[in-house]
Amino acid sequence: MDFEEKKERAISIMKSKKMWSSNYAPPLLRIAWKMGIRIPPLPFARFWQVALLMGIPIGSVWGILMWFFTWKESGMDPTDAIARSLLFDVWMGISMALYHWWRRIANNLPDWDGLK
């Protein structure tokens, strides 16, 4: 089974379990699919894939917004702002990866490699 077939099978399984599409195929993942990046729906993806896909963009946008709306005016050192943004990237990525790992277990989803 090729990637697209497995993806559609995984999505049909999650729909049958009444999972929200925003949980298994959020906008960031849909953009990645349109760019040709082959990442399984989030509950089926590997821990590090979810951590990178969700942590880096969300944490980076958060850091930029915090810089322009709060940190810059308070006189925060740019190095400190970057360090805080990186910590938030890591925290967000791990949190989202744990959430989707839990969703896979709670919904008794099969392993990506075992999809048929």
Image (cartoon, rainbow, N blue to C red):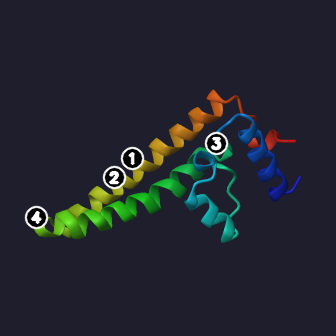
What is the crowding at mark 4: few (fewer than 14 residues within 10 Å), some, or many (at least 20)? few
Rendered image: mark on residue 8: none
Amino acid carrying mark 2 in the image: Leu
Question: Which residue was labeled with disc 3?
Answer: 43
The disc, 3 or 1, on the residue closer to the chain's N-terminal end is: 3
The CA distance from mark 2 to mark 4 is: 20 Å
Q: Are marks 3 and 4 in contact (CB under 8 Å)?
A: no
Is disc 4 placed on a helix, strand or loop? helix
Amino acid carrying mark 1 in the image: Trp
Question: Which residue was labeled with disc 1?
Answer: 91
Q: Are marks 2 and 3 in contact (CB under 8 Å)?
A: no
Taking the spot 41% from the left edge, 51% from the top edge, the residue there is 90
106 and 84: which is toward the camera: 106
Q: Which x, y percent locates residue 71?
A: 18, 64
Q: Which x, y percent locates residue 4?
A: 81, 58
Taking the spot 40% from the left edge, 55% from the top edge, the residue there is 89
Taking the spot 68% from the left edge, 69% from the top edge, the residue there is 34
